[in-house]
Amino acid sequence: MRGVTRYAAALVLLLYLAILTSSGYAQTPTPEFEYLNGHVVRGAFLAQYRSVADPLRLYGYPITGEFQMLTEHGWGTVQYFQRARFDLVLEPNGVERVKVANLGSLLYAGPGPLAPVPTDPLACRRFENGKSVCYAFRQFYDANDGLTNFGLPISDLEIAERRYVQYFERARFEWWPENPPGERVVLTDLGKRHFDLIVRDPELTRPELPPSAIIAQLIPHAQAFVTQALIPSGDQQTLYVIVRDQYNRPIANASVSVTLIGPEGLRLTYRAAETNADGITQLTFFAGRFEPQTVITLKINVQALGQETETQTWYRIWY
């Protein structure tokens, strides 16, 4: 499949006030924010993200924007990252503050097989709950303000998923001996695991429009594929076309036309239905009666948001 050809032209969005109203930030100054991995991190969540020396290593990228859900603190605003979940909690004194969720405790299923590693008291640190952190895990824990960022250890050194692991209140450490020195302790993506297990709403992971985009150019992108790349002569073929903007959001009501290009200058044009709410349309058509090994090219023209883009795909007559 060839790349999308872009014909960029300006498109003025709805007034930014409407965007702010829908996101719950109407009539307030635009706060400081970072736009990471297609998601906005702002306000108290951004302050928490920046409070550690290496946020990408400890928390990872955001995988959702802010949304409301029921947590162990009650109903409130949260945001998921690859390795964490930030909760905005209202304290008894009326002040809101961010707590990093205890995802390690929430996801720990109980003791597993112990790792066959001897305990050296000189290389270990023992905690008041009776658990110890040893060797490289201890070095990583101490180097990253472990009690604050990871909490207490809640498991021994165990074997899980063919690796040595240890659970903490807010993290799980993994040992990757194949990595270069300094990168052999890896944090499990507990944020993504918890989101996929408990929330399971793909709509929340879709990229957001940056708050600074008062006026934006929305550029349609198109992808196309057929259900049968190799197809018998005289069969029915089905084509799928997916239309999204540069933020990977679906574009509905896009107009799609398809031109079939065959041997001896054959050109047939079809009109597909407009894209649905997921930015998808499909077209079933007669694949044609051609000699085996004939390659048929499909050129797709898409008109959306006052702009035009093209893509193409192909199929081969097999027999």
Image (tube, rainbow, N blue to C red):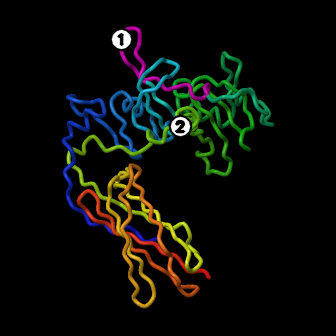
Q: Report the number of numbered marks.
A: 2
Give how far across and how far down residue 152 sits, in percent: 61, 23
Q: Residue at left 53%, top 83%?
A: 289
Q: Considering only vertical position in the picture, is 146 above or below 249?
A: above
Which residue is located at x 74 percent, y 26 percent? 121
Q: From the top left corner, tell me how far across and down residue 50 is, in percent.
A: 39, 34
Determine the residue positioned at 70% across, 31% down: 123
The reply to whether the magenta stretch includes residue 131 is no
* Residue at the limit of the structure toward the bottom, as seen here: 264
Say which of 4 and 150 sits in front: 4
Q: Which residues are magenta?
A: 88-106
Residue 89 makes an appearance in the image = yes
Position of residue 197 measured from the top left corner of the image (x, y, whole percent):
59, 35
Is residue 92 one of those drawn in magenta?
A: yes
Q: Is residue 284 left or right of residue 220?
A: right
Q: Find residue 220 and report its horizontal and vertical position in percent.
A: 32, 59
Looking at this view, name the residue that lies furthest to the top: 93
Q: Amino acid at mark 2?
A: Arg
Badge 1 marks a residue whose secondary structure is loop
169 above or below 15?
A: above
Q: Which mark is residue 200?
A: 2
Kind of residue sitting beneath label 1: Gly
- Residue denoted by label 1: 94
Query: Visible in this render: residue 62?
Result: no
Question: Is 137 positioned to the left or the right of 317 in the image?
Answer: right
Identity of the residue drawn at 38% across and 42% down: 39
